[in-house]
Amino acid sequence: MLVGAPRKGSNARHQVAEHLEELERLVDTAGGVVVGEVTQQIDKPNPATYLGKGKVEELRLAIEEKGATLIVFDDELSPSQGKNIEDATGQRVMDRAELILDIFATRARSSEAKMQVELAQLQYMLPRLTRMWAHLEKFRGGIGVRGPGETQLETDRRLINVRIRTLKHRLEEVQKARVVQRSGRKNEFRASLVGYTNAGKSSILRAMGRAPEVFVEDRLFATLDPLTREIELGENARVLLTDTVGFIRKLPHNLVASFRATLEEVTEADLLLHVIDASHPAWEEQRSVVNQVLGDLGAGEKPVLHVFSKIDAIPEEQLLAMQERVGNLLPNSVFVSSVAAEGLEPLRRSLLGAAREGTRVADITLRAEDGK
């Protein structure tokens, strides 16, 4: 059962419909099936139950009627709000942040991604231990683990804090290794694909790099690990193009912090290719979300080329009107398709121009005795 509670306003009804549609896609990605939804426009969240008392009762009745076994809120709940709603409805409650973390956990493939997701999950769980007891079995070691006089809750909290420190240390080592790796590329022109999840970033890398091994799937968060390919642009120019994890509205803060080592690929790039799904009705909101995350990462002032993707999914008349509007709003933009013949040529030409301007020249010092 989905629950949306937008702030009261002129656009609240339209906004909650779009947001719950995205939430349903997240649930689908996580392997769940949506059976219904409950919405309420609010001035501010109820500190005890987020929704009003009457709406919580309506939620309980809707759950009984539909046979739902999980409630998913579109907003992040405090530990006490989650517990109170579970007590009132008798069903498990999950907020948007926990759902996204769960999806990341199933998508993580590399050891680095798994560590980053685990760290974010543990930091999310720590203040919610009394409510999430069942999720902690894997951290309990039985005899010899508990300290003198500790309750089980204190033991779990201690073990999680130890694990968090361990993961942070390991990720610091990963971060150092990435710095060394990037130093070997400092004389190369580097571009990073950034954008909302499922905007088409991986499809662009796969097509431009002629790299069938790049994983592409029409689902949210198909890519978690950064992947770099050398792209030949012609005229003796090339670019190191990196695909990065997609962003989303209300991305959990713990997740952004945990993935900082990975996302430094973005802050070190010479050019950001902000990929925008031109066929999505909420592309402007998605663009704003990405800009906000880039700002949080310290990459808000990086040179940006806006890449409007999936134009093959837009009727020609609508596309022409959009190109005219975007041309006035975002002059530094190109429109591309990863499936149409020559659909990526505008991007290739723009990258060629950027690479010519931005390719770094290595400083080489030779001594006279070298004989050169």
Image (cartoon, grey):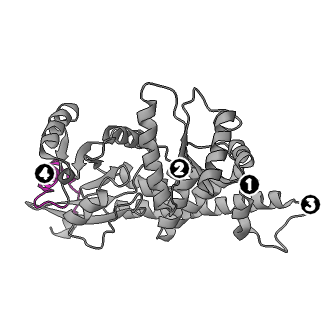
Can you identify the residue that label 2 sits on?
36
CA gap between label 3 and label 4 equals 67 Å
Q: CA distance from mark 3 to mark 2?
A: 46 Å
Q: Which residues are magenta?
A: 339-366
Q: Residue furthest right?
A: 149
N-terminal-most mark, 3 or 2: 2
| Element under disc 1 | loop
Instruction: Give amino acid for label 2.
Output: Gly
Query: Residue at 60% of width from left, 28% of height from top?
Result: 44
Give above or below for 152 relative to 199.
below
Q: Nearer the viewer, mark 2 or mark 4?
A: 2
Residue 196 rendering spot, x and y as whole percentages: 37, 49
- Specify few, some or many for label 3: CA neighbours under 10 Å numbering under 14, 14-19, or 20 or more: few
Disc 2 to disc 1, C-alpha distance: 29 Å
> Is 356 contained in the magenta span?
yes
Distance from disc 2 to disc 4, alpha carbons, whole Å, reads 43 Å
Check residue 207 in the rendering and tell me which mark sits there, or answer none: none
Which residue corresponds to mark 1? 129
Left or right: 38 in relation to 293: right
- Position of the C terminus, as image quadrant, is bottom left
Pair 1/4: label in front:
1
Residue 31: give x, y in percent of width and height.
50, 64
Q: Earlier in the sequence, mark 1 or mark 3?
A: 1
Give the residue displayed 74% in from the left and 63% down from the top: 159
- Which residue is nearer to you in this view: 73 or 122? 73
Q: Name the residue at 45% across, 43% down.
A: 19
Q: Which residue, given by chain and number where applicable, does mark 3 sit on?
A: 149
The reply to whether discs 3 and 4 touch (Cβ–Cβ < 8 Å) is no
Question: In terms of depth relative to the viewer, which is nearer, 76 or 174?
Answer: 76
Upstream in the sequence, badge 2 or badge 4?
Answer: 2
